Image: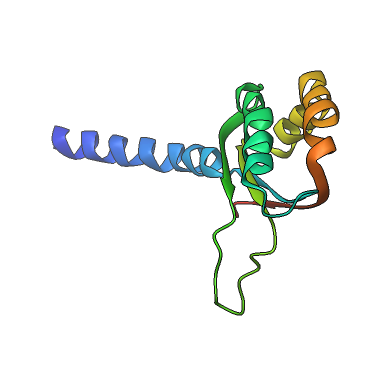
Amino acid sequence: MKKNYIKVAALLILWLLAPLAQAQDKTLSHVVIVWLKEPGNDAMRQKFIDASQPLSRLPGVISRHVGVVLPSKRQLVDDTFDVAVTATFKSREALKAYLNNPRHKKILHEKIKPLVNRVVIYDFVTP
């Protein structure tokens, strides 16, 4: 009988903690698609990547991945861009703080924008 109480208590604790685990799994993804002023220039792509690396260390960033376009013959694939960045944050507030961080603004204006012709950004949240 004592074992049944322990099982019930364990199940109750798991049931109560489940919403917390689900809330922690919710993240916000910030995807930045970049067309450079010199399209297809590998040196400029690397310059962009190098200039943007310090952004990975800003507060609120859970993960950040930067890569170059993978050419494709598939019709549905847009392979006209040069570089893409995906950054993951805990919340909308964390993204907002990241975007307003003085280091982010400085790197963006001084090092990244001079290389960029066009940017498209997608933000989405895990349901």
Q: How many marks?
A: 0
Q: Quadrant of the N terminus?
A: top left
Q: Name the residue: 78% across, 25% down.
A: 107
Residue situated in front as seen by the camera: 123 or 17: 123
Residue 99 appears at what percent x and percent y? 79, 32
Position of 28 with respect to 93 (left or right) is left
Position of 1 with respect to 83 (left or right) is left
Q: Is residue 53 above or below residue 116?
A: above
Residue situated in front as seen by the camera: 46 or 99: 46
Q: How is the image coloured?
A: rainbow
Residue 9 appears at what percent x and percent y? 30, 35
Position of 108 with respect to 126 (left or right) is right
Q: Name the residue: 65% across, 43% down.
A: 45
Residue 49 appears at what percent x and percent y? 63, 36
Q: Is residue 58 above or below residue 32?
A: above
Residue situated in front as seen by the camera: 78 or 114: 114
Residue 95 appears at what percent x and percent y? 73, 35
Q: Name the residue: 31% across, 42% down.
A: 11
- Residue lying furthest bottom in this view? 75
Q: Quadrant of the C terminus?
A: bottom right
